[in-house]
Image: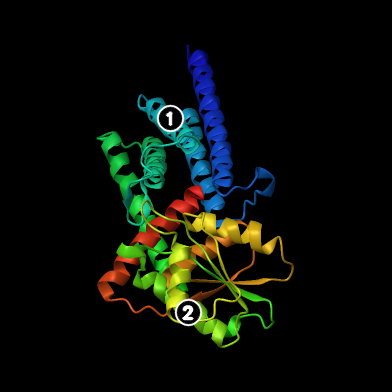
Amino acid sequence: MIKNKKYNSSKSLLLFILIILVSLSFLYFIKYQNQSLSLSEFNLLKIGNIINLFFHFILILGAFIIFYSKSIQPDIKYLFPILIISQFLLISVYVASKMSLPFDDLYYLSQSGNRLFIGILFSLYQFTFFVMMFYIWGNVFKLKNLLVIRSILNAGWIMLFFLVLSFVFIITKENSFEESDFKIGKNNSAVVLGAAVWSKNKPSPTLAARVDKAIDLLQRGKIDAIYLTGGNAPGELAESEVAYNYIKKKNKNVVNIFKETNTKSTNEQIQYIESSLLTNENNKNIIVISDSYHLVRIIEISNFHNIQIQVAPSDLPLSFEKALYFKVREALALVVFWFFAY
């Protein structure tokens, strides 16, 4: 009887470990696909990849302990149901990314409904993963009372912890960008990342400030070309078109100013830099212009792609309330990028 119990525990442990390892591999596949990269470019030493590996290792270690410890009588009746839910969510993310979802015309927080929907699925997957991790380690520490509820609460706390960590990471990095760090040369090009367009195709203050920064660098001879990026929401001109018209209305010379009208996210704009600018022109120095808090994530995405960029923050003044709002939103986006490269 004891042998049968050990045999069944071994089978359960091996099955669990196998599913977790396959899930981790699938997650890495999704991350690199999100960035239009192949797994041949995989680098474990990226922040997000290390985080993924660490938590999967913690999960497997806890499972090994509860299945093989003689002093633990684990309550694992909810373990495989939680595992199934988490895997279902991960597969749903992949399927949703391949489908033509019906939410593209909806916009909230400057994001399309499709991106928000997939981002929510990613977040739910990570939440259930943390619930499973705390459920396992609750068994390790022999916590019996309200174990599932405790696991849910702890999962919420750790997600909040990463949001705070990301926020602190942003505010400690955003003030370190200096123009004096720009490489000297005549092949410096600025890439202005798109931002919101207001009614009647008027650039938002955020977009206008980014364009103003690019014009200033051009006039001072710091750069010799400007690339405006950004597609359009329904019923609007493309962000790059609005930025281009804004430059013309200021009676500025539009020579060496170029437009890209297809990208709809920061990820796509970094991919545009990699595929259209860096690969087609040798020795081009790219200077990305955006808001200081946004540039932190831009650098993280660029590092994920192994591309070298420099950055220049716009000079847009923000009230405390607006700065806090934008940085919290950006912190959330950075956490999603670390975990899912999305």
Work out whether residue 172 can be spotted.
no
| Label 1 or label 2, whichever comes before in sequence order | 1
Secondary structure type for disc 2 = helix
Q: Amino acid at mark 1?
A: Phe
Q: Quadrant of residue 155?
A: top left
Label 2 CA crowd tier, 10 Å (few <14, some 14–19, many 20+)? many
Marks 1 & 2, CB-CB < 8 Å contact: no
Circle 2: residue type: Lys
Q: Horizontal placement of 315 versus 183: left or right?
A: left
Q: Nearer the viewer, mark 1 or mark 2?
A: 2
Q: Nearer the viewer, residue 62 or 167?
A: 167
SS category of the residue bearing label 1:
helix
Q: Is residue 248 above or below residue 258?
A: below
Label 1 – label 2 distance at C-alpha? 46 Å
Residue located farthest toward the top when viewing the structure as drawn: 1
Residue at x 46%, y 76% (from the top left corner): 247
Q: Which dot marks residue 88?
A: 1
In the rendered image, residue 232, in percent from the top left (x then y), is placed at 43, 55
Q: Is residue 156 left or right of residue 50?
A: left
Determine which residue is flagged by label 2: 213
| Residue 215 placement (x, y as % from top left) | 51, 80
Residue 271, image x and y in percent?
A: 58, 56
The residue that appears at 48% across and 67% down in the rendered structure is: 296
